[in-house]
Amino acid sequence: MAEKMKVASIYRGFDLLSLGVGLLIGCLLVSLTYVTVYQSDMLAFPTMASPMSKEEAYSLISQQIDYQSEPRCSHGGALSHLCENPETIETARVSSSTGSEIPPQRNEFSVSEVTTDGNEKVLVVNSSRKTDPEESDSKPMCDTSSNRCDVCDVHGDIRIITGGKGSPSVLRVTASPSANRQSWQVKPYARKWDHGLTDIIKPVTVRSTSDRAAAPRCDVNHAAPAVVFSMGGYVGNHFHDFTDVLVPLFQTVRQFDGEVHLVVADLNRLWMIGKFGHYFRRLSRYDAIDLDNDARVHCFGRTIVGLRADQDLIIDPAKSPMGYTISNFLQFMRSTYGLNRDYALKLAAQPGKKPRLLLIARSRSRKFMNADDIAKLAEKLGFEVVVSEAAKDLVEFSKIVNSCDVMVGVHGAGLTNLVFLPTNAVVIQVVPFGRHEWIATTYFGKPAKAMELKYLEYTITADESTLTELYPRDDPVLTDPQSIHKLGWEKMGEIYLQKQNVRLDLDRFRPVLEKALELLRE
C-alpha cells in the first residue's frame, strides 16, 4: 500500500511540474506572437524609443503623426490615417540597401539622430512628448513675422486642393471645433516685401475645418511631407533664382533628405529640369506636383506652405529651425555638381603655382569694353586668366568657377556664381557709376563674407563709364546721380544698369588685383 502511495505521489509531482512548464512555454509563445503581429503598432506608443528601419523612421519623422487625432480608417497600422480609400496610394521610394537612399554628403549638417547597433546604423525615433490635439489646434498654423515670406507648418490630416481658375488651398481636417477659426492667405514666394509682385504671385488659402464630411476626398495619399512654393516672380534671373527659390528651398526642405514632395505654383519644368535639374533631383526624389493644373486632391501628414528665407544669399542659423548656415548650402551645391575644390590656392604653401582668375564677361549691358587689356594686366601680375560669360550649362560653368581663385565681375546676376567658388577665394565686384555702393554691398558684399570669401569692391568713376558718351558732362546723370534715383527704380535702372558699360582705368584698377594676390598669400 505504501509503495502504491509513493508511486501516485511521484505522478502527481510530475503532473504539476509539467503543467508549470507548459504554462510558461505557452505564455512565451503568446508574447512572441503578439510582438510579431503588432510590432508596427508598438512604435505608436509615445514612450518608446526603439530601433526601426530607415523607411519607417523617415515616415514617422516626416509626418510628425498625431496619434491622439481621429484616424481616417482603422487598418490597424501606425500609418493607418493614410488609407482613406484613395484611388492611388503612393509609398515612399526609399531604398532598403544600407546607405543608398541618401545621396552622399560632405560634412553637411545632420538632421537625423544616428546610433550604431552592432555594425548596422539605425535611426531612433523618440516620441516621448505627447501631442494635445486641442493645444495644437489653438496655436497659429502660420508665422507672418518675416518680411521675406509667410510660412505655415501644418501637421495632421492635410488635403491640398489645386487652384484651377481660383485660389488653391491647403486644408487641415481636425476633430477640434476651434479649428474653424483659422484661415490664412499666403503668397509662397520669398520676396514678401516687394510690392511689385502683389498681382503676380497667387495666394494660397491655408485653413482648418472640423467638418470632415464636407472635406474633399483624397485622390492620392503621400507618406512623405509636402512643401508648397511658387516659381513665379523673378525666376529666370540668375540672382533671383538663388535668392528667391534655391537658397530658401534648401533651408526649408533639406531636413527631409530627399523624402519630400515639391508642390509648385507657376511650375516651370524647363527651368526646373533643364537649368537646375541636378539641384532639384538631389533635393527631392519625387516629380513635382503642379499646384495650378493637377486636378487631384493630394493628402499629406505634414505640409509646409512658403519658404524660410533671411537676407539675400545668407542663412541665419539662429532663425533656421535646423540651424543651417549658407556654408551648408555651399557644401550641398559642391557635392551636387561634383565640385572638387573646397579651398582656394594658398600662395604661401604653393609659391610657384599661378592662381586662376575668372573675368566674367557680359554680352549686353555693363560689359567690360577693354576685357582683353584687363586680362593682359592680370597675366602680367601673375594670374592665369579665364574670360567667360556665365553659360547656360550650369554644370560646366560651375566647374569653371570652382577651378578659380579670384572672380572679377561688374555688379549683376553673373556674380551670383560666387556660390561655386572655393572657400577663401577672392571676389572683386566692379560697381557701376551712379551711387550703387549700397546695392552692391548688400547683394554681394555681405553674402561673400558670410560664405567665407575674401571681398574687394571697386567703384568706377564717370571717366570709366560709357555714359559720358551718351550724356553731356553737366547732365544730372553724371553730376547728381542721387536725383536720378529719386525718379524711381525703373528710370534709375534704365540709365545706370541698362545703358552703361565699363572701361576700367588699368592704372587705377591695378592695386585691386595686387590686393587680391596679397589675400591669397595669407
Image: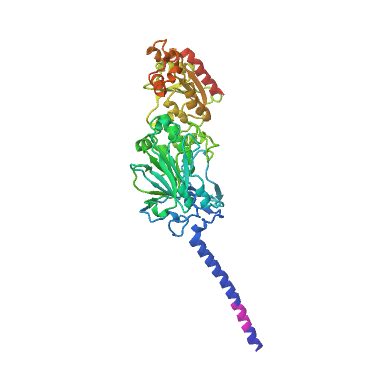
User: Where's residue 86, x and y in %?
Assistant: 37, 54
User: Where's residue 285, x and y in %?
Assistant: 41, 44
Residue 433 in view: no
Front position in the image: 35 or 197 = 197
User: So how many labels did they put on this image?
Assistant: 0
User: Where's residue 359, x and y in %?
Assistant: 43, 22
State the extent of the magenta-drawn residues as a range. 8-15
Front position in the image: 32 or 187 = 187
Q: Is residue 13 magenta?
A: yes
Does residue 469 sit above or below 493 in this rendering? above
Q: Give the main secondary structure of the magenta stretch.
A: helix
Residue drawn at the location 51% of the way across and 34% of the way down: 315
Residue 504 in view: yes
Front position in the image: 137 or 256 = 137
User: Image quadrant for the N terminus?
Assistant: bottom right
Q: Is residue 35 magenta?
A: no
Does residue 208 sit above or below 446 in this rendering? below
User: Image quadrant for the C terminus?
Assistant: top right
Residue drawn at the location 44% of the way across and 28% of the way down: 416
Residue most extreme to the bottom: 1
Image quadrant in which you'd find residue 387: top left
Does residue 163 sit above or below 235 in this rendering? below
